[in-house]
Amino acid sequence: MNTRTALAFAFACSLPLLAACKRDATPPKPANGDYAAQTWVLPAEAGSMAPDLVSAPGERVLLSWINRRGGRRNALQFASYTEQAGWQSQPRTIAVGNSLIANAADTPHLLATPDGALWAQWLQRQPDDAGGYDLVLARSRDGGMAWTQITRVNDDARPVEHGFAALWPDGADALGIAWLDGRAQGIGEAHGPDGHNAVSGAMQLRANRFDMSLNRGVDAQVDARSCDCCQTAVAMTARGPLLAYRDRSDDEIRDIAVTRLENGAWSAPKIVHADGWKIDACPVAGPALAASGDTAVVAWYSEAGGTPTLRLARSPNSGDRFFAPVAVDAGAAVLGRAAVAIDTQQVWVVWLREDAQGQTLMLARYPLDLSKPLQKIQVAKLGARGLASGYPKLAVDAGGAWLVWTDVVKGAAHLKGARIAR
């Protein structure tokens, strides 16, 4: 497995930044009405990586990250931001410990439910160095001051990998979660080229529901054979949660599939587009997904046909079918690692490129029908190479978009942000 397909762990990052600061002064509006990127100063300290970015009630944006510094225990932290008031407080710690896994590809996630609770998910190394890790879920009833409710998502004790989760609200005070689960795999004696155990059997896609007391429902096996280490994504449609993931056929075709939870059951998985990408190793390149009403959009990376391509497809009916995709970007420089969002007027997509001059973070806007690009801009040039830049995260509101990513400057990683606005 080459560096493009290997599961990466992030580097230590960024210089300390003030926690209670607003974004820079608004620049002049572009004459053509396009959007422009401006610096959004983040409160993450040196050593921060693996960001997540989600919208929350009250016009808030929630940012989480793992603070990972030499000689210290890993800490999962978060902060809340509004455009009117800036960062609401100093960063708060959700969990801390040497067993808390810092992984640039399999990042923690935050979610706010209508009852005012906050939920967090992360990876925890199993005791006694068993060789596997678990998914951990926590809930805070007081806005993140205390995280006293904690449970393990996977209910098996197998020393295998469980991760790449996606979260969604289930009613006012409960949460749905889907994840990749390795309980059906057998552990071999050898190790793969990326240092992971060589395994037999298949990775499963599973899902469940947790109520306000973290009582679990019954696991649903959504797909008995999925790609081993590609991100999952979920979005709320008018007909229920739509889940996207990279499937894996018996002959190693690994195309993007979707399934929807409706009336308590998951629909039969459907391929978004038959790329026919055959690859004998996990590309660590899961889909990005967003929805508004019945409209859903999926962005994904593929090397089908031999050309790296970032594709974007739309469904008019909550994922029942997707139109033929458009190629957002193609060529040897395309890394993918996309994030996507949708508002009432447009679809947003961000992705990474890398050539001899380095990496660039790109952003494009499309009309809701994806008929043509409205705008394509370079948000930033990065000093990072390969997987050190991790996976960018994107959120939108009425004023534009919020964007976070990881860069590397003089050997040290830095968490950075941008506000995309007129």
Image (tube, helix red, strand yellow):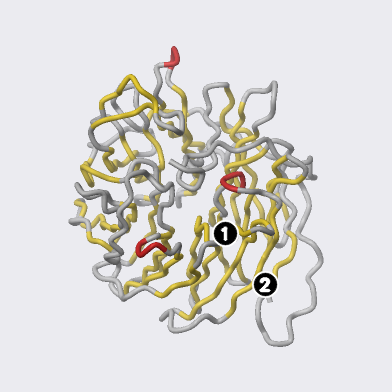
Kindly report which numbered mark, 1 or 2, lies closer to the viewer in this rendering: 1
Which residue appears at 29% of the width and 58% of the height? 258
- Residue 407 in percent (x, y) is at 68, 49
Mark 1: amino acid: Leu
Q: Residues within 10 Å of mark 1 (few under 14, many from 20)?
A: many
Which residue appears at 34% of the width and 56% of the height? 244
Answer yes or no: is residue 146 visible.
Answer: yes
Q: Nearer the viewer, residue 267 or 332?
A: 332
Q: Residue 203's image quarter?
A: top left
- Residue 187 in percent (x, y) is at 30, 23
Residue 79 as seen in the image, left or right of residue 31: left
Q: Which residue is mark 2?
A: 421
Which disc, if any, is residue 352?
A: 1
In space, the residues marked 1 and 2 are separated at their CA atoms by: 20 Å
Mark 2: amino acid: Ala
Residue 152 as seen in the image, left or right of residue 187: right
Q: Nearer the viewer, residue 330 or 232?
A: 330
Which residue appears at 39% of the width and 68% of the height? 297
Answer yes or no: is residue 119 visible.
Answer: no
> Farthest top residue?
128
Tell me the SS state at disc 2: strand
- Residue 210 in percent (x, y) is at 34, 39
Residue 355 as seen in the image, left or right of residue 314: right
Q: Is residue 295 above or below residue 116?
A: below
Lower sequence index among marks 1 and 2? 1
Q: Is residue 86 above or below residue 378?
A: above
Which residue appears at 60% of the width and 56% of the height? 60
